[in-house]
């Protein structure tokens, strides 16, 4: 591990809970956290604001390379404007999923994602963390859950936030998003080679976090890192 900052990659479908799990794993280890989906959402929002069409690949790639973004204490800024909540809107997620099929846009976001790899370690969540962005990750987790469980979790989240929601509609949208993310040519959503597949359908968030931490301990790298530090 000397010299190389360790990465735990957590990939999975939309609403699998990977964001929450990855964030808590990062907190438990005292590591940095990358929400790569936020970068796609930021690019989508910036495109909308700049009037760039969602299929204009060269313009989107140019926009992504120069995206003026800042992550600060759990808040996200685009050109100085706070967009923490704005990028979570369903319409922005939908637009993000559309532009995420474009190879030039994905390439433009690569270095921006790799910049997050800083000592003592990084927990990165997304779709292609283990396969493309950090293929040398120390631990690769593919976190999944049944479509019904994911739709139900999203439904509860929306209701708790005071939004109205329709479970059948959510399930339909989620299946469409899954199909697009899994069927695209560039970095399709699949478990990477060597990834541990973790089905969180019957697990609570705490149990899922613990399962990832257990897998990390089992790599033996955690104890080696601790020994190097002492
Ligand atoms: O995880 P999320 O819902 O915030 O991601 C929004 C969209 O961005 C999702 O539909 C697919 C895309 N995405 C991607 O293609 N690759 C990633 N590493 C992260 C997100």
Image (cartoon, rainbow, N blue to C red):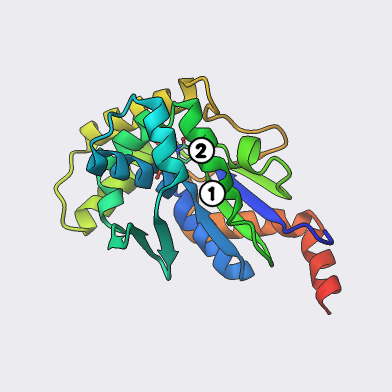
Q: Nearer the viewer, residue 195 or 82?
A: 82
Image quadrant assignment for residue 78: bottom left
Q: Indicate left or right for 167 with 206 as reference.
A: left
Is residue 139 in view? yes
From the image, tell me which residue sits under label 2: 108
Estimate the spatial distance between the alpha carbons at disc 2 and disc 1, rounded to whole Å.
8 Å
Looking at the image, which residue is at 31% across and 46% down? 154
Q: Nearer the viewer, residue 12 or 78?
A: 78
| Quarter the C terminus occupies | bottom right
Give the x, y percent position of residue 132: 63, 36
Q: Which residue is mark 1?
A: 112
> Badges 2 and 1: C-beta atoms under 8 Å apart?
yes
Q: Can you give x and y, in whole percent of width and height, for residue 123 in the image? A: 59, 56
Some atom of ligand 1 lies within 8 Å of the CB belonging to the residue at label 2 = no
Residue 96, image x and y in percent?
Answer: 36, 37
Instruction: Find residue 180 and report its horizontal and vertical position in percent.
Output: 40, 24
């Amino acid at each position: 591990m000397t010299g190389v900052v360790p990465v735990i990659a957590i990939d999975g479908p939309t609403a699998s809970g990977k964001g929450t799990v990855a964030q808590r794993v990062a907190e438990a280890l005292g590591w940095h956290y990358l929400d790569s989906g936020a970068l796609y959402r930021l690019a989508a929002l910036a495109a909308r604001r700049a009037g760039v069409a969602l299929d204009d690949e060269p313009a989107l790639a140019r926009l992504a390379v120069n995206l003026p973004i800042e992550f600060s204490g759990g808040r996200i800024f685009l050109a100085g404007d706070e967009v923490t909540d704005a990028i979570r809107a369903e319409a922005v997620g939908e637009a993000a999923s559309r532009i995420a099929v474009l190879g030039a846009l994905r390439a433009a976001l690569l270095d921006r994602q790799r910049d997050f790899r800083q000592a003592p370690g990084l927990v990165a969540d997304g779709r292609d963390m283990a396969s493309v962005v950090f293929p040398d990750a120390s631990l690769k987790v593919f976190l999944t859950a049944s479509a019904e469980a994911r739709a139900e979790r999203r439904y509860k989240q929306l209701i708790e936030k005071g939004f109205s929601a329709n479970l059948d509609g959510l399930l339909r949208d989620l299946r469409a998003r899954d199909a697009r993310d899994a069927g695209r040519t560039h970095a399709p959503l699949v478990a990477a080679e060597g990834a541990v597949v973790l089905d969180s359908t019957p697990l609570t968030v705490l149990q899922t976090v613990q399962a990832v931490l257990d897998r990390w301990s089992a790599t033996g790298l955690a104890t080696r890192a601790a020994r190097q530090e002492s």
